Image (spheres, rainbow, N blue to C red):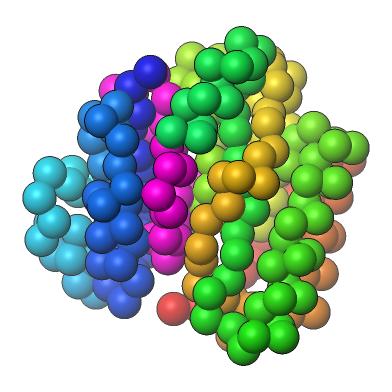
Amino acid sequence: MTISVVIPAHNEEKYLGACLEHLLAHRSPDVIEVIVVDNASADRTSRVAASFPGITVLREGRKGAPFARERGFRASRGELVAFIDADVLVPEGWFTKAQEAFREDPEAVGVTGPYHYHDLPPFRRFCTNALCDMSGLVHSVTGAQLWGGNCVIRRDALEKIGGFDTTIAFYGDDVNTGRRLSDVGTVLHLPALTVSSSARRLKGQGMVKTGMAYLMNSLSELILHRPATRKYRDIR
């Protein structure tokens, strides 16, 4: 199964280099392309991406991760499309584990896993990572838990649901995608597919406020099929 990787990037010059270094170091032979979508950036995001060999850089002027993911998806060619955030560090074996999950479950249309935050103080990191690991329990109830910056989706399934919902600004977009994918197949939540991420939103917005925002919007998406919050704050 061939894999395309799509990375939405809005003003990500600080984090994107490390993201691409890890990705290229751990890519599998089946990764046929890596696409960075410069999402209305006003910094050196495009130049950082272009400095790495073999990276395709696209421009999406409409700001918002759903717009960027949709742009990258429509330009990609792989049978599987992997989506990671620009501040995510992919570990060794990540691609292989995702492929194995699809081979073992013919009904699988998407696979996802939690984040572990690498730049928090030890105790806060332990508590936050433990909470992220509990997302598997949420998934066992909803069947629709998806981490937008850490997932791999079958191209034909994403086409079947019409791609990403670009009417969503930020909160709830990944739950929306997971919910709609679960209508056409199985979304798998794999603890082994954990990635490392910065905790910039937790540090910049506060852990309680961030957690409540994600919880409220996830529940709203699952029950009402729309997010509760339209506004969000960029934290870089």
Q: How many marks?
A: 0
Quarter of the rendering containing residue 105: top right
Front-most of residues 28 and 199: 28
Quarter of the rendering containing residue 110: top right
Q: Is residue 15 above or below residue 229?
A: below
Which region is colored magenta? 66-95
Q: Is residue 94 above or below residue 12?
A: above
Quadrant where the C terminus is found in the figure = bottom left
Identify the residue shown where x is 42% and y is 25%. Answer: 80
Front-most of residues 159 and 83: 83
Which percent across, then down, holds residue 130? 76, 66
Q: Is residue 6 left or right of residue 151?
A: left
Magenta-span inclusion, residue 208 = no
Q: Is residue 204 left or right of residue 140?
A: left
Quadrant where the N terminus is found in the figure = top left
Front-most of residues 93 and 135: 93
Which percent across, then down, holds residue 210? 72, 73
Identify the residue shown where x is 17% and y is 47%. Answer: 55
Front-most of residues 58 and 111: 111
Identify the residue shown where x is 54% and y is 41%. Answer: 151
Which percent across, then down, holds residue 30? 29, 27
Magenta-span inclusion, residue 83 = yes
Quarter of the rendering containing residue 21: bottom left
